Amino acid sequence: MRLMSLVSVGFVALLLLPAPLLLAKEATPMAEDPVLEEMVDEIADELRCLVCQNQTIADSHADLAVDLKNQVRDMVRSGKSQEEIIDYMVERYGDFVRYRPPVKTSTYLLWAGPFLLLFIGIVVLMQNLKKRRLRTDEQEVALTPEERKHLAQLLKSEEEKNKS
């Protein structure tokens, strides 16, 4: 019994051994100016990687993302504000480069699309369930002439038993 508990503890320890590695991130290079790097990271969190498309340029390791982040760093060094840098990127790549695009007429479908699809899915599901319920109700009611005759005989015999 003691051997089994030691084996269990050892197995759990082996499973948990790589856990710190899962949380580890790639080391960011030390900057000469930590305030500058903080601003670069803040801007990089707002810009989408054009290669990966589901990551920010801060999270992506694609060559284009690294180039864009270096370009942001150079712009911050030259004294441009966050709004100016983001506006420049939007002007160059369109609203798609923003990880959180603004709500405006050209992006309404982007913001409302998931809710619209959910609503359509619920409506289609409700219609299908209603059709299925009607089909099963019709199948239960539809009797052949022989079944109706047999049912009438059963009911008649049941009534006679109850009278006597």
Image (spheres, rainbow, N blue to C red):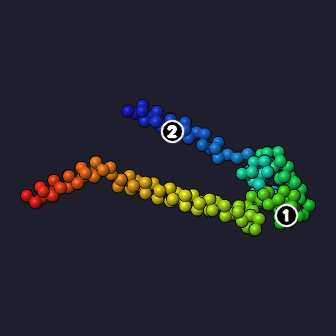
Q: Which mark is residue 87?
A: 1
Identify the residue shown where x is 86% and y is 61%.
91
Q: In the figure, is residue 116 to the left or right of 146?
A: right
Q: Which corner quadrant holds the N terminus? A: top left
Nearer-the-camera pick, 47 or 17: 47
Identify the residue shown where x is 46% and y is 59%.
130
Q: Which mark is residue 12?
A: 2
Q: In the figure, is residue 136 to the left or right of 124?
A: left
How far across and down, in percent of the image, does residue 27 sit? 75, 46
How far across and down, in percent of the image, does residue 76 sit? 87, 60
Identify the residue shown where x is 30% and y is 50%.
145
How far is the residue under mark 2 from the one under mark 1?
51 Å
Question: Which type of secondary structure does the marked residue at label 1 adopt?
Answer: helix
Q: Quadrant of residue 93?
A: bottom right
- Up/down of 145 relative to 11, above or below: below
Task: First in sequence, mark 2 or 1: give its number.
Answer: 2
Q: Is residue 62 visible?
A: yes
Q: Are marks 2 and 1 in contact (CB under 8 Å)?
A: no
Q: Which corner quadrant holds the C terminus? A: bottom left
Nearer-the-camera pick, 133 or 7: 133
Label 2, residues with CA under 10 Å away: few <14, some 14-19, many ≥20: few
- Up/down of 105 relative to 157, above or below: below
Q: Which residue of the protein is positioned furthest toward the bottom in this rendering?
A: 104
